[in-house]
Amino acid sequence: MEIFLSAHLRMGMRGVWYLSARRRYPRLFQGVPIGFQLGIDLGGSKLAIAIADADGKLIAHQTRPSPISGDPEADVQTIAADAADLIARSDLAARDFDAAGFSVPGPIDHERGAILAPPNLPGWEDVPLRDRMSELLGLPVRLENDANAAALAEWRFGVGRGAHNLVYLTMSTGVGTGLILDGRLYRGHRGRASEFGHSCVEWEGERCGCGQRGCLEAYLGGAAWTRRLREITPATSRVCALAGERELVLPEHVVAAAGEGDAFACQEMERFNHYLARAIAALTFALAPEVVVLGTIATAAGDTLCLEPVRALVAAQVWPTLGDEMRILPSGLGDKLPYYAGVCAASEGFPS
Ligand SMILES: [Zn+2]
């Protein structure tokens, strides 16, 4: 487990913490709640927990492998125990917090605060996470879809600061999208917006994990791309050499091999950039964002392999009135993104 406590907390002794906190959090010293936020990002592979002060500054955080065991009640108790432990080690108590927020994979039933059946949380079906965690932590709990929470995080704390209209697009296992429109998170009817990863980019195209054909996710999602690469990567390609064998090929091997000029890898990057640009162009005509923030694969591929070609393709596809002032940028929060996503879920997640 990776743990961070900010300097004044690391001093350890309660008296020292209070001396230090007196300057930094005078209201806490006077026994007045100051509105800390507890942020939790629960993914299929990692559980990230953070504590932020009222300004959103991270004062403690930790990451560990996701505790998903197939028994949601046991998992929820483990997560609550981890959160309580971080709170205690930070010399805080539940009463010092405004709320806890969960950034979680959808679909979510926002009215009931329940997680329905995310593919990467096996065994979690219709889990009443909001109410159960609220009981265990003694705090109000807010839930937010992970892509929405990431969009909020990049908007509040990352490269999207100051924008009124922002699109967040992430290509990890699937394709997640989050929309900040006219200065607020857009959720749509019953909170069901932002599933742009399943809009059709090829009629009768590749089969998607959702059951439909031709979804953007079937072309840009890490799982779909990995499947394709393991079928078609030539044995002579540098991609295979980097992976060791074709059955182990991942998108990151394509990125690395394209950086070395491998012809197959460059072709695959070109295909990826093409579909990504198509998605951004469609979103641009609908929403006129000022900033498009790209996460994961696009951020890892960087300027030369992805961002510059995508900017050029989009510029050729959209009207100058829409494209000239629009910035297409890599994620600015890097490995801190899950912490800020959790914290944003606490401050702005549903039902705020
Ligand atoms: Zn789909």
Image: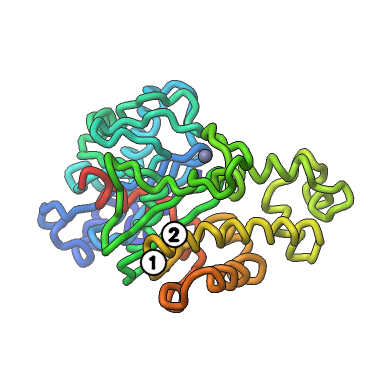
Q: Are marks 2 and 1 in contact (CB under 8 Å)?
A: yes
**Whole-percent x, y for residue 179 in the image:** 36, 56
Query: Would you say residue 157 is visible in this rendering?
Result: no
Task: Pick out the residue farthest to the right.
Answer: 236
Question: Which labelled disc corresponds to residue 283?
Answer: 2
Q: Nearer the viewer, mark 2 or mark 1?
A: 2
Q: Is residue 85 left or right of residue 196?
A: left
Question: Which labelled disc corresponds to residue 242?
Answer: none
* Helix, strand or loop for disc 1: loop
Residue in view at x 70 percent, y 47 percent: 250
Residue in view at x 36 percent, y 31 percent: 115
Task: Pick out the residue farthest to the front.
Answer: 203
The tag earlier along the polypeptide, 2 or 1, is 2
User: Ligand 1: does it lie within 8 Å of the C-beta at label 2?
Assistant: no
Query: Would you say residue 256 is visible in this rendering?
Result: yes
**Whole-percent x, y for residue 352 in the image:** 20, 48
Looking at the rendered structure, the kind of residue marked 2 is Leu
**Whole-percent x, y for residue 276 in the image:** 56, 58
Residue in view at x 36 percent, y 25 percent: 126
- Residue that label 1 marks: 289
Query: Which residue is at the front of the view, 247 or 193?
Result: 193
* Helix, strand or loop for disc 2: helix
